[in-house]
Image (cartoon, rainbow, N blue to C red):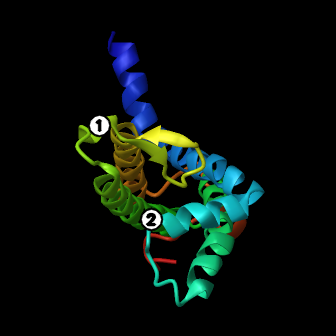
Amino acid sequence: MSALRSAARSWWRSGGTGLVARLIVGGAFLALAVPKLQDPVGFLKILREYDLAPASVPFLLNFCAAVLPWVEALCGALLVLGVAVRGNALLFAALLCFFSVALVSRALELQQGLPFCAIKFDCGCGQGVVNVCRKLAENAVLLLLSLFVLFGRAPRFCLRARLFGARSATTGR
C-alpha cells in the first residue's frame, strides 16, 4: 500500500497529472474541432441561432465560423504536444466560460416549460444534438482541467522544454 502511495506521489510531483489533464483538454478540443472543420456552413448556421452578432454584420459570424475551429484544432494540438501550455490552457478556460454562458442562454430561449435538463439541441460543439446539463457538466470538467493545467506546476512532459530548453530558476527564462 505504501509503495502504491509512494508511486502516486511520485507521479504527482513529476507532472504526470498535468500531462493527463493536458491530453484530455487538448484532445477534446482537437476532436471537437474536426466536425466543424468538415462542415463550416453547418457550423455557421448553428452560430446564427445564438444571435451573438447583429444580422447586419454577417462578416463577424462568417469569420468566427471560419476561424474558431482552426484555433481550437491548432491550440488543442499544441496543448497535447506541450507547446505554449499555459497560454492554451488560459484560452480554453476563457472559451469554455463563454461557450457555457452561450449554451445556458440558448437553452433558456428553448425551454418553453420543459425542465432545464430535458432540453436537447445542437449546441455547435461538434457532437450533434446534446443534453444541456450533460454538456454543461462536460464543460465544467474541461474548465477545471484547463485551470489545473494553467495554475499547475510547469509541465515536465512538454515539447517546449525540448525545443527551447528548460527555464532557469535564476534568470526566469
State the residue in front, 59 or 94. Answer: 59
For residue 36, what is the image quadrant? bottom right
Q: Residue at the bottom extreme? A: 56
Is 78 positioned to the left or the right of 116 in the image? Answer: right
Task: Locate the N terminus by quadrant.
Answer: top left
Q: Residue at x 73, y 57 (%)?
A: 39
Q: Is residue 133 above or below residue 51?
A: above
Q: Residue at x 38, y 56 (%)?
A: 103
Mark sitting on residue 142: none
Q: Amino acid at mark 2?
A: Leu
Is 110 positioned to the left or the right of 67 in the image? Answer: left
Between label 1 and label 2, give the one nearer the viewer. Answer: 1
Task: Tell me, yes or no, if residue 60 can be seen here.
Answer: yes
Q: Residue at x 35, y 62 (%)?
A: 97
For residue 67, what is the image quadrant? bottom right
Q: Is residue 155 above or below residue 118?
A: below
Circle 2 residue: 95
List x then y, in percent, for residue 60.
Answer: 57, 84
Mark sitting on residue 117: 1
List x then y, in percent, for residue 158.
Answer: 61, 54
Q: Residue at the front extreme? A: 112
List x then y, in percent, for residue 156.
Answer: 54, 51
Task: Give the class, few, some or many, for how many residues have Cα within 10 Å of label 2's Cα (few <14, many ≥20).
Answer: some
Q: Is residue 104 above or below residue 21?
A: below
Q: Amino acid at mark 1?
A: Cys
State the residue in front, 117 or 167. Answer: 117
The numbered mark, 1 or 2, whose residue comes first in the sequence reads 2
Secondary structure state at the residue bearing disc 1: helix
Q: Residue at x 34, y 49 (%)?
A: 144
